[in-house]
Image (spheres, helix red, strand yellow):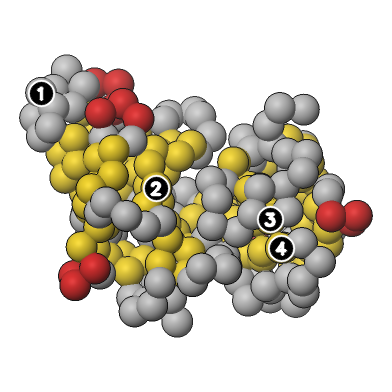
Amino acid sequence: AQSVSQHNHHVILSEAASLELGCNYSYGGTVNLFWYVQYPGQHLQLLLKYFSGDPLVKGIKGFEAEFIKSKFSFNLRKPSVQWSDTAEYFCAVTRGAAGNKLTFGGGTRVLVKP
Amino acid sequence: GAGVSQSPSNKVTEKGKDVELRCDPISGHTALYWYRQSLGQGLEFLIYFQGNSAPDKSGLPSDRFSAERTGGSVSTLTIQRTQQEDSAVYLCASSLWANTEAFFGQGTRLTVV
């Protein structure tokens, strides 16, 4: 079965610190990878996505993620966080070129202290 | 509308009653998803519709849950004989095709008392 794991459930850090959130998936074939963010009181929105090509993907608000196929990973990074990055972050995967259901990891709650 | 619309935004129901949750996806989107988000939990996949294909119902937690998508557009999630453990936020999302960005609605907060 396809699964997505986010190892950090809660992260607390100070402004200007660097952030890295881990995401691993279990499927060995072609995958399409996403990071979504849910700010307090808001709906989920897309941060970035990877389908093919350059494994280093840049998204909105200074976020980037790196696809490492050999490690089945798609970790999210931001060099310097702001208080406004306080949110819950979800990694998600679809499988295969034709696509199928979007499977989410358990989420990571990030609290940035001012 | 411009985005995914869900109604009602909040629903309080008595245990044992049936509820219907509605999702209006973005016009032209062929894929539609339902998820459940419980307090402190991630997004639990419920059901996925893609075009005219048979829906992927593998995430429905019991036979009390069902969903349909009429005319390839509006979808209704029905929960029969609600239980307290059904209390959660039910999220709907749509995407143009499978593998493209999914756009989420604001969700329906269901409380079973």
| Residue located 59% across and 41% down the image | B103
| Separation (CA) of disc 2 from disc 4 | 20 Å
| Residue located 23% across and 48% down the image | A56
Tell me the chain of label 2: A
| Separation (CA) of disc 3 from disc 2 | 17 Å
Tell me the chain of label 4: B
Asked if badges 1 and 4 are on one and the same chain, I answer no
Residue B3, percent from left and from top = 68, 31
Mark 3: few/some/many CA within 10 Å (<14, 14-19, 20+): many
Label 2 vs label 1, nearer the camera:
2
Q: Which residue is mark 2?
A: A49
Ranked by sequence position, the earlier of labels 2 and 1 is 1
Tell me the chain of label 1: A
Residue B66, percent from left and from top = 78, 67
The answer to whether residue A112 is left or right of residue A35 is left
Q: Which residue is mark 1?
A: A16
Residue B19, percent from left and from top = 82, 53
Label 1 vs label 4, nearer the camera:
4
